[in-house]
Amino acid sequence: MVNFNGNISEEITILSVENRGLKYGDSLFETLRVVANKILFWEDHYFRLMESMRILRMEIPMNFTMEFLEEEILNTLKANKLTNARVRCTIFRGNGGLYLPDSNEIEYIITANELNSPFYLLSDASCEVDLYKDFYINKGLLSTLKTNNKIINVLGSVYAKENDLDNCLLVNEDKSVVEALNGNIFLVKGNVIKTPPITDGCLKGILRKQLLEILEKIPDYELKEESISPFEIQKADEFFITNVIQGIVPITKYRKKQFETSVARDLLAKLNLKIRLG
């Protein structure tokens, strides 16, 4: 069951060939984790979405409040008979125009799929990565938004499959490592934990924000938002990926370097505790 502008039905052929998200990538999305009918980190997701819509000059309807959109998401879950779900909320400008839109009014689609587990679990599976250098992430503001323009992530995923990798690392024009194909990255060396700054072009990730808040309260770790070079990765003790669906995903191998997972396990336990208490 799909929610299209508040109308929930099984019909999936609801988009016009004039859809601007399809024609021009004139679209944003949020991927949400819902557990027991509670949207995790909902306030952060909502305000990131509103900020992104303003940056793209989309017109935000007066009724598009946090309460309204939350109700639309939960109605979609109810229609799909789900309480734990991965939800995608896609916002796009209405039909009309060429590069210049006829209007800045928006439409939306909400879809939901069942989650395998209501809790964040640390996978014991191997995760081998390497650099994807065919194309670069630009350091500008648009790279920090969750737009539908994800062709680099698509091509990087194809490259990973062709080379028997589990993921790839994306770099910017300065050759700094920015993020993984599906999330932000954190590097651990001793008691120092580094993650690329937003100014490097990495996604303004919701789980990245949660971990930064957790790390700021732990005196045992020194948190740094600094650029990460490929050379640093081979000297690191740990290296992991974060996103709201999987939580923390340890990278186990980069080229000949093998990584530990103890800090990732510690942080995941603190993340789950924060969710339970929050």
Image (cartoon, rainbow, N blue to C red):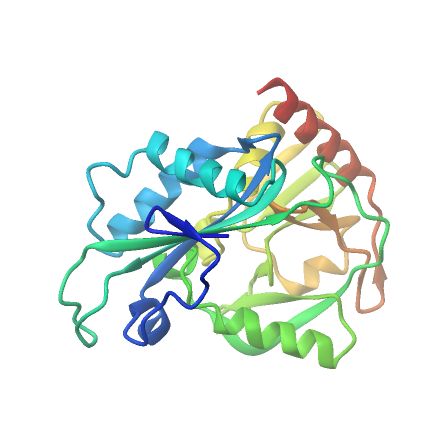
Q: Residue furthest left?
A: 102
Q: Is residue 113 above or below residue 39?
A: below
Percent from the top left, x then y, of residue 67? 36, 30
Asked whether 213 or 194 is in front, the reply is 213
Asked whether 180 or 131 is in front, the reply is 180
Percent from the top left, x then y, of residue 56? 26, 57
Kindly identify the residue that appears in the image at 37 percent across and 45 percent down: 49
Residue 186 appears left or right of 87:
right
Percent from the top left, x then y, of residue 159? 66, 78
Asked whether 11 or 195 is in front, the reply is 11
Total marks shown come to: 0
Kindly identify the residue that appears in the image at 76 percent across and 55 percent down: 251
Q: Is residue 188 above or below residue 200?
A: above
Q: Residue furthest front?
A: 10
Kindly identify the residue that appears in the image at 30 percent across and 34 percent down: 65
Q: Is residue 127 above or below residue 155?
A: above
Kindly identify the residue that appears in the image at 60 percent across and 73 percent down: 156
Screen quadrant of the C terminus: top right
Residue 255 appears left or right of 106:
right
Residue 165 appears left or right of 222:
right
Percent from the top left, x then y, of residue 212? 56, 35
Asked whether 201 or 40 is in front, the reply is 40
Residue 273 appears left or right of 76:
right
Q: Is residue 192 above or below residue 100?
A: above
